[in-house]
């Protein structure tokens, strides 16, 4: 019982850390985007006028990937999912072993 509570607590703590990092990422992304737009407007470097759009677009792509990881992938493929998959695969292996053992027993009984 206590172990289960500890696992649930650790899972909740890890999820909160993930979400917190995502929120920090979003705030930093917004501040940096504002800075890039201001820099593009005030600094005429000689490159195309909207060079900051490429940086913001690339960064937004990475932010979307981070969002998907936190709210979609890790939400469904967590420790419980891993445990269920392991138990399912172990059960399949045990079933195959039992089938092979029964075939060996049948072969041994037919040979005697």
Image (cartoon, rainbow, N blue to C red):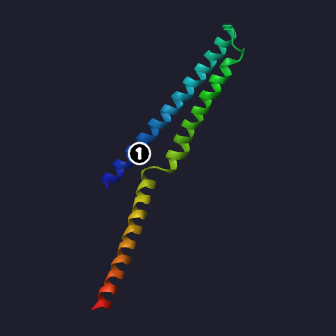
Furthest-right residue in view?
49
Q: Position of residue 110 (x, y in %)?
A: 32, 91
Residue 41 versus residue 94 in the image, above or below? above
Q: Classify mark 1: residues with Cα within 10 Å, few (<14), some (14-19) or many (20+).
A: some
- For this rendering, which residue is in front, 85 or 24? 85
Furthest-left residue in view?
112
Which residue does the numbered mark 1 point to in the structure image?
Answer: 11
Left or right, 38 with respect to 4, comes to right
Q: Position of residue 58 (x, y in %)?
A: 62, 28
Q: Position of residue 98 (x, y in %)?
A: 35, 76
Determine whether the residue tagged by mark 1 lies in a helix, strand or loop. helix
Q: Position of residue 86 (x, y in %)?
A: 40, 59
**Count of number-bearing discs:** 1
The quadrant where residue 30 appears: top right
Q: Residue at point 52% right, 33% down?
A: 22
Where, quadrant-wise, is the C terminus in this rendering? bottom left
Q: Residue at point 37% right, 44% down?
A: 10
Q: Residue at point 62% right, 30% down?
A: 60
Q: Residue at point 54% right, 42% down?
A: 71
The quadrant where residue 55 appears: top right
């Amino acid at each position: 019982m206590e172990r289960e509570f500890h696992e649930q607590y650790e899972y909740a703590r890890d999820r909160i850390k993930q979400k917190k990092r995502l929120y920090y990422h979003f705030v930093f992304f917004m501040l940096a985007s504002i800075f890039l737009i201001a820099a593009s407007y005030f600094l005429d470097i000689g490159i195309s006028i909207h060079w900051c759009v490429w940086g913001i677009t690339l960064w937004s792509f990475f932010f979307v990937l981070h969002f998907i990881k936190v709210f979609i992938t890790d939400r469904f493929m967590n420790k419980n999912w891993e445990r269920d998959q392991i138990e399912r695969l172990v059960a399949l292996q045990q079933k195959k072993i039992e089938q092979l053992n029964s075939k060996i027993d049948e072969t041994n009984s037919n040979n005697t």
